[in-house]
Structures are given as structure tokens and as C-alpha cells.
Image (cartoon, rainbow, N blue to C red):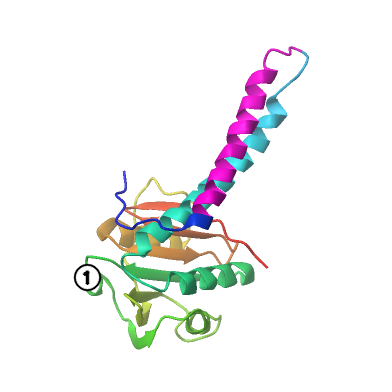
């Protein structure tokens, strides 16, 4: 179980998650009540519940990501805007957020940036064709320390074959440190984050 070090003070995210979980609970209860009706087949209802549960999982990931990041950076809103923008455009991205353990000994070939975190700067770094867009950005506190970092790639045989290099790198760094690693797939636009060797999908709202 992952321990929480933040205060999770995000009322809107928490209420949204409660609403989604209540929706799943109501759907499950309806299915349970319908079992006594022998004329009704419930097989088609499972897909609806599954979709609602996946949405709840994504909202939970967004909520807990806020909890994990809040003690280490004040720039959560900037990171959230960045993730939403990159996801909508299907631009790939990889960001390592340093927490208690120093990450520099685990990274290679980074280019020093030394600038305050902003979603505009991050978007320009990861814009396709930018010389810095390959590799990962390192964030420490409220600073973009460096870009184009090479992360250790997980070689776990348990990982899905659908995971590309970015996802394996995100998981790899989270296996060897306490970092939070944000990743956006350029193929699908799906956003997720890695912690302690596990990858969690994020609910992202597009304009």
C-alpha cells in the first residue's frame, strides 16, 4: 500500500470521486436487484459498470496524485494544465518529480534548464521536433532542473506489451526511487503516473 504524505486538501476532486463511486455503487445495486428477474439478462450491463469503474479509478488517480505531489511542489496546477494540453494534442511527454530521494544519480545526459515550472515552458520543451522533446524533464520543488534526461527502463516481464519506452521508463524510475513520474502517450493521448513500480491512469478533461 502506498503511504500518503500530503493532506489531500482538494475538495472538488474528492467530491467528484465520491459522485463517480456512488454511480458505480448504484449501478451494481440495480444489477443485484435485477437478478431475481429471470427474464432479464445482465451480461450487457457489465460493460457499463466496467466503464464507470474505470472512470472512477482515473478520478481516484488524479485525486491521489495531488496528495503525492503537494508536499514537494506548489506547481500542481501548472502540471495539471500541461498534462491536459498534451493529452488533447497527443504529444508525448515524460516528467520526473523529485521527492525525498535525489534523482540525478539515476539520470543520464540531461540538459540544464533551471527555470520556474510553467505549463507553457513544458509544452514548448515537449513540442514535436524540439531538440529537447526526447527524454524526461526533471522537476525539483518548483523548478524545471533539466530536460532530455534518460531514465532507467523497467525490464519487468509483468509489464503489458502495449507499454512503450516512455511508460517503461516511468515505471523503471519509480521502481528505483520514490519519484512521481508523469507520462503522456503520443499514440493515444492517455495520461498516467507511476509510483513504486505501478502505473495509474489519469482522468483528463479535454476542452
Instruction: Please give the residue where the numbered disc 1 appears in the rendered image.
Output: 102
Asked whether residue 162 appears in the rendered view, the answer is no
The residue sitting at 53% across, 56% down in the picture is 12
The image quadrant of residue 176 is bottom left
Q: Quadrant of the C terminus?
A: bottom right
- Residue 29, given in percent of the width and then of the height, sits at 62, 26
- Whether residue 75 appears in magenta in the rendering, the answer is no
Against 103, is 29 above or below? above
What's the magenta bit mostly, secondary-structure-wise?
helix
The image quadrant of residue 154 is bottom left
Q: Quadrant of the N terminus?
A: top left
The residue sitting at 66% across, 36% down in the picture is 47
| Residue farthest to the right, as pictured | 39
Asked whether residue 177 appears in the rendered view, the answer is yes
The residue sitting at 66% across, 24% down in the picture is 31
- Whether residue 18 appears in magenta in the rendering, the answer is yes
Residue situated in front as seen by the camera: 156 or 175? 175
Left or right position of 45 against 179? right
Q: Which residues are magenta?
A: 13-38
SS class of the residue under badge 1?
loop
Amino acid at each position: 500500500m502506498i503511504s500518503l504524505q500530503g493532506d489531500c486538501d482538494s475538495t472538488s476532486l474528492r467530491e467528484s470521486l465520491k459522485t463517480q463511486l456512488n454511480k458505480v455503487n448504484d449501478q451494481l445495486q440495480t444489477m443485484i436487484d435485477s437478478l431475481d428477474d429471470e427474464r432479464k439478462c445482465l451480461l450487457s450491463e457489465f460493460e457499463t459498470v466496467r466503464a464507470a469503474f474505470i472512470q472512477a479509478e482515473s478520478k481516484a488517480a488524479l485525486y491521489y496524485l495531488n496528495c503525492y505531489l503537494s508536499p514537494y511542489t506548489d506547481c500542481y496546477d501548472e502540471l495539471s494544465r500541461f498534462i491536459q494540453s498534451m493529452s488533447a494534442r497527443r504529444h508525448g511527454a515524460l516528467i520526473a518529480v523529485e521527492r525525498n530521494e535525489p534523482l540525478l544519480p539515476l539520470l543520464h545526459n540531461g540538459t540544464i534548464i533551471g527555470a520556474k515550472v510553467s505549463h507553457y515552458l513544458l509544452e514548448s520543451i515537449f513540442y514535436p521536433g524540439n531538440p529537447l522533446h526526447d527524454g524526461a524533464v526533471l522537476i525539483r520543488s518548483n523548478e524545471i532542473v533539466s530536460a532530455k534526461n534518460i531514465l532507467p527502463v523497467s525490464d519487468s516481464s509483468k509489464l503489458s506489451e502495449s507499454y512503450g519506452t516512455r511508460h517503461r521508463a516511468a515505471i523503471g524510475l519509480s521502481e528505483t526511487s520514490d519519484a512521481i513520474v508523469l507520462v503522456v502517450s503520443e499514440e493515444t493521448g492517455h495520461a498516467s503516473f507511476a509510483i513504486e513500480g505501478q502505473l495509474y491512469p489519469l482522468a483528463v478533461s479535454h476542452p
